Image: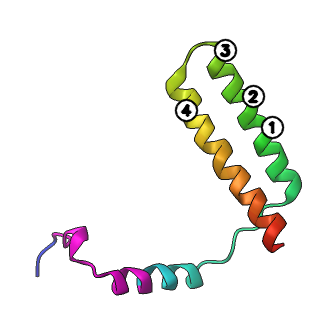
């Protein structure tokens, strides 16, 4: 027996899919209220604007990604809610 983990490429697509589905079913779903989502969006926009104003492009790109992710969650709530 070895303490080394197998390389990530050794996992087949089917095995990875089964593992991810098992993890998904094992944990309770996270519920985000619409008001919490709106609050997170407002905060993210403030951070993005602050970074952009200070010419901090690296962090502005980070907050851009956060904004895109939050908007995706909002879109899922609208289309599937």
Residue to which mark 1 is pinned: 42
Residue to which mark 2 is pinned: 46
Please rate how many residues cluster around mark 4, counting C-alpha atoms within 10 Å: few if below 14, some from 14 to 19, many from 20.
some
Label 1 vs label 4: CA separation? 16 Å
The first of marks 2 and 3 along the sequence is 2
Label 4 vs label 3: CA separation? 13 Å
Q: Position of residue 37 (x, y in %)?
A: 80, 52
The first of marks 3 and 1 along the sequence is 1
Query: Start and end of the magenta stretch?
Result: 4-18
Q: Position of residue 11 (x, y in %)?
A: 27, 78
Label 3 vs label 1: CA separation? 16 Å
**Tags 1 and 2 in contact by the CB under 8 Å rule?**
yes
In the rendered structure, the answer to whether residue 14 lies left or right of residue 70 reads left
Quadrant into which the N terminus falls = bottom left
Label 2 vs label 3: CA separation? 10 Å
Q: Position of residue 75 (x, y in %)?
A: 76, 60
Tell us which disc is closer to us: 2 or 3: 3
- Residue at the (80%, 37%) spot, across then down: 42
**Tags 4 and 3 in contact by the CB under 8 Å rule?**
no
The first of marks 1 and 4 along the sequence is 1
Tell us which disc is closer to us: 1 or 4: 4
């Amino acid at each position: 027996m070895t303490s080394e983990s197998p390389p990530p490429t050794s996992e087949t697509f089917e095995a990875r899919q089964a593992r991810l589905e098992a993890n998904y079913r094992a944990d309770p779903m996270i519920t985000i209220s619409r008001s919490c989502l709106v609050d997170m969006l407002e905060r993210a926009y403030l951070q993005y604007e602050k970074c952009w104003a200070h010419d901090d492009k690296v962090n502005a790109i980070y907050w851009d990604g956060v904004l895109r992710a939050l908007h995706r969650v909002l879109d899922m709530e609208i289309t599937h809610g």
